[in-house]
Amino acid sequence: MENDLMKLKLFKSEFLSNLSTQMLGTGLAQILPLLIMPLLSRLYSEKEFALYSTFLAYSAVLIVATGGRYYVAIILPKKEKDALKVFCLSIALTILYTFLLFVVCLIIFYGFPNTLNTHGIIFLIPLYVGFFGLWQSFFNLSIRGKRFKLTASSKVIQATTYATVSGLLGLVLTPVGLIIGKISGIVFSLYHLKTRLKLKKDTYSIKNLKEVAIKYSDYPKYSILPNFLGTLSTQSLIFLIGYYFTQTELGFYGLTNMCLMAPLGLVGISFRDVFYQRITYLINEKQINEAKSFFLKSTLMLVFIGVIIGGVLFFFGELIFSLVFGDKWSISGELASILSISLIFKLGVSPTSSILNATNNVKTVSLWQTIYFVTTFTTLLLAILYFKTNLYILLKVYILHEAILYSFYYYLQFKSLKQNN
């Protein structure tokens, strides 16, 4: 009994230490771009922010399939050798996927004229997707090894490079400076992870990789399509505002979206990385009661933080944006005030969603993401096409939808943990 108590204390201490390290690194990674954002908002126009937002939206959708999503499974194997096999499989599939994307982009560029062809952006998308896919594999391998200082520093390097390159290119009036800055950030961060991990140059046969590919085949089979749909849903406002509204309105929303991603990154992503490793450990060790307690306490903490951040944005969003980014961006502040409510739900639910992977409920994730995709586009398209809503009403419809769907998502997470009892 005494040994169990000691283990629990050590577990809590280690978790808090890892979490604080992740939050420090992720915090700096989110704060650095925000600190330079007042400069970027003056160097780049609303339309250039719209271009950057479009690039990020398309990239986010295509990133879903990198590595066959085997990078998610790198953390799961008990044996280190098996984890390295999954890692190598993920790297190989990422390289192949990137090559295929370049081929598709060539066909689109020469055969189907579109706005993405402007400034050669269509070729920057697979470049970013490929490097990001490699980065995810190295990042998750670092998480598996509890190299949280390394993952934190990699995020700081990524943010510092993005801020520096975007700022410098903005000074020379480069319209794609934000995009090039984003790509540069992921490249430097990837190089940092690769050189610090110092992996042994083990080689694995196709047979070895095929074994782990089959063992963790649920990830490409049940994860790619629903995550693709889920990401499309997440980026739905970018696509729909860009198509049905003006590029200026998309630019205003783009800045709002980037700023709202900061708390989701600072708290949500850093918490998710550590939470996934810990909840997987508790479930593998059959410590289900401890896992339940950990899950519920995590939710309470996330909701509390979300209410504080959301409250500030709800009451002072327009004022903050006007003071920080300039008067012309006050509209972005109005949008942030509306979207602050959905921020609370996302921050309270998304970081703990990795529990569905830890409990091998990949099909449940697929179910929710499919429902989320269908309801998101149905709701928003009805609001735009049938009710002819303006941008402000559209966002209010969106937050109502988010509140309902994320509440259902949390129910599925809690249910998956109870089923493991």
Image (tube, helix red, strand yellow):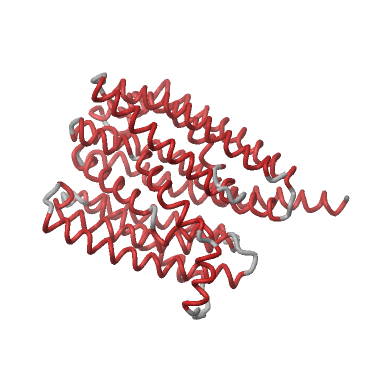
Judged left or right of residue 330, residue 4 is: right
Q: How many marks?
A: 0
Question: Which of the 4 quarters of the picture holds residue 257?
Answer: top left
Coordinates of residue 66 in the picture (x, y in percent): 39, 59
Write the residue at 38% across / 35% down: 374
Q: In front: 136, or 161?
A: 136
* Residue 204, placed above or below residue 311: below
Measured as percent of width and height from the top left, residue 312 is found at 46, 25
Relative placement, left or right, of 291 versus 168 is right
| Relative height, residue 270 to residue 104 (above, below) | above
Foreground of the two, 112 or 149: 112
Residue at image point 36% right, 23% down: 397
Of all residues, the one furthest to the right in this rendering is: 1
The image position of residue 273, as x and y in percent, is 54, 51
Q: Tell me which residue sits at (46%, 71%) in the image.
A: 195
User: Percent x, y for residue 293?
Assistant: 71, 39
The C terminus appears in which quarter of the rendering? top right
**Residue occupying the point 81% across, 52% down:** 6
